[in-house]
Amino acid sequence: MIAIKSRKISLKGQEKSIVEIKQQLGILEGDLFDNESYPRFSSKLRNQNNFPLSVKRLDIFQVNIGYMCNQVCTHCHVDAGPDRKEIMTKDTMQQCLEAIKIAGAHTIDITGGAPEMNPNFRWFIEELTKIGVDDIIVRSNLTIIVANKSYHNLPEFFKANNIHLISSLPCYSQENVDKQRGDGVFTDSLEALKMLNKVGYGHENSLLKLDLVFNPGGASLPGDQHSLELDYKKELQQNFGIVFNQLYTITNLPISRFLDFLVASERFEEYMEKLIISFNPNAVENLMCRNTISVSWDGNLYDCDFNQMLNLKIASSVQHIADFNVDALRDREVVVSQHCYGCTAGAGSSCQGTVA
């Protein structure tokens, strides 16, 4: 067992904000945990001769085009929702397009919030298609497709541009999905999946890829990905006639809204201990941050989407997409902190980043 100081704070009868409780626990944004309580993630890497963590190549541009979302999910590390106003402008998108041309990245990973809510979303997709990017990923929450009439033709738009969809469905039961993502989300998600299946997504011999993402509803690690995928395929096809390609599992990272949940439920220390004990050195080799650049809505650069949310900027002289320099970014060291335990726990998160 890891020695972790017992500093649990009861919320009963107290009128303290989550911010105040975090401060009492020593949880700070950007440097989540104090040195005394937990072994440093950098020390774990050093023990495995992996510190500093180096970048292997630059294959993937992950572009967060806005934090606005039609959902408010309990696990969301972006703290996305309808009231978020941060939206990537067309000018910043153009800068991204120029950088992608220079880098020759083979994969563009578009995320949010609900990226489809950016008014220039479709223009950006069409411009990426013109460049000839091998794999254009859109991380969709599914429910946006049925949110209102302006989004109902998204399946046809995705098909026309050969978009690779990675969509969150944290369970195949209504109770679990609605508990994590809100009432009615399960029903809307199934409707969207059926619309995508109808245009050809997710079928065995189709080139239109539809992958789903599982993340635990509480303070636990994901189960075996292969077993979960088999269960998902069986349940969704038998009960709803829905098909998809692959299932990815993601570990919830202790930041933003999920961190608030951990603190409010007095499970923060328990969850951190679980992540630390489950550290898997073999997961370090394929961490997404080692071949990815994460671009925020305002054009700032980060090693990953999680660092973006903590404002842990990239360790490079180039920190904005307008100043993009592929050589400088390839030579950088990855910025790590304690939240990185989430991506190396157990089998590791196979699809790091956010699905709104």
Image (cartoon, rainbow, N blue to C red):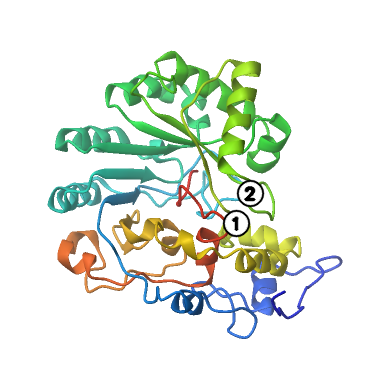
- Look at the picture and state if 107 lies above or below 279: above
Depth order, front residue of 318/220:
220
**Where does the image place residue 268, in percent across and percent down from the top left?**
69, 66
**Amino acid beneath label 2:** Thr
Q: Type of residue at label 1?
A: Arg
Rendered image quadrant of residue 56: bottom left
Q: Is residue 228 left or right of residue 267?
A: left
Residue 138 in the image, given as x and y percentages of width and height: 38, 37
Residue density around tag 1, few if under 14, some if 14–19, many if 20 or more, within 10 Å: some
Where, by quadrant of the figure, is residue 34 drawn? bottom right
Label disc, if present, on residue 74 of the rendered structure: 2
Q: Name the one closer to the observer, 73 or 344.
A: 344
Where disc 2 sits, the SS reads loop
Mark toward the start of the polypeptide (2 vs 1): 2
135 shown above or below 287: above
For label 1, the residue is 257
